[in-house]
Amino acid sequence: MFNLILFGPPGSGKGTQSENLIAKYHFKHLSTGDLLRSEISRKTPLGKEAKKFMDKGQLVPDEVVIGMISFALDEHPHAKGFLFDGFPRTSQQAEALDKLLELKDTAIEVMLALTVTEEELVTRLVKRGETSGRTDDNNEHVIRTRILEYHKKTSPVAEYYARDGKVVNIKGEGTIEEIFQALCDEIESRMRKSEKS
Ligand code: ADP
């Protein structure tokens, strides 16, 4: 199994690049943002609870997203690898993920972290809000809250994986193709290494 985390602040391009990576490598895509939006559109109790946080730009409580990921992992016992997108977003989620993967006798191979300047992030998210229909992209105050949450709670997750030498920074500005190529180069070099070991 080859599992990776695509990491980066809101608007860094995780969704776009995930789609490209899935098409090329056939990982199972686990996006907590997508899973939560699906719960909201189906009006489940979990969705109703999550929406209160998401509309304000705040993170949904850890136990909710960890439960969701645990369920999703069990649903795909034969996956050749998972691509985590938007998860883990707190140190507690990272610890929980490591434990869940350990139970499956596997681990995170690499965290690819997209780096984008703050002003570029806000510009992209405001623009996305004009067409995406996502309520959390429609309001600059909510966007700024999401970026603050990222700095406060999510960036420590990169430090967590950096301790094991698993983090690689990739410049998230440039053309979509250039960024995709940089991600693929890194994945393939890691795949070769993990095949050897
Ligand atoms: P973006 O990366 O653009 O913020 P996402 O679709 O990943 O978009 O997330 C949208 C919202 O869903 C977040 O602002 C947060 O409220 C919630 N969310 C998604 N993933 C998580 C997570 N792992 N932990 C807590 N909240 C999450």
Image (cartoon, rainbow, N blue to C red):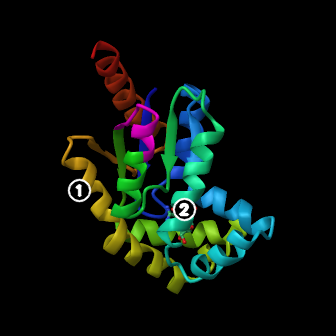
Q: Which residue is mark 1?
A: 159
* Residue at position x 34%, y 31% in the image: 186
Q: Is residue 185 above or below residue 158?
A: above
Q: Which residues are magenta?
A: 100-109
The 10 Å Cα crowd at callout 2, few under 14, some 14 to 19, many 20 or more, is many
Task: Give how far apart the Cα atoms at labels 2 and 1 are.
Answer: 21 Å
Q: Is residue 67 left or right of residue 95?
A: right
Q: Which residue is mark 2?
A: 65
- Left or right of 88: which side holds 109? left
Q: Is residue 148 above or below residue 174?
A: below
Kind of residue at disc 1: Glu
Q: Find residue 103 and report its image quarter.
A: top left
The answer to if 107 sits in the magenta stretch is yes
Can the viewer see residue 95? yes
Q: Position of residue 117 (x, y in %)?
A: 34, 64
Numbered marks: total = 2
Residue 97 position in % (x across, y down): 42, 50
Q: Secondary structure at mark 1?
A: helix
Is 89 drawn above or below residue 126 in the view shown?
above
Kindly tell me whether mark 2's CB lies below 8 Å from ligand 1.
Answer: yes
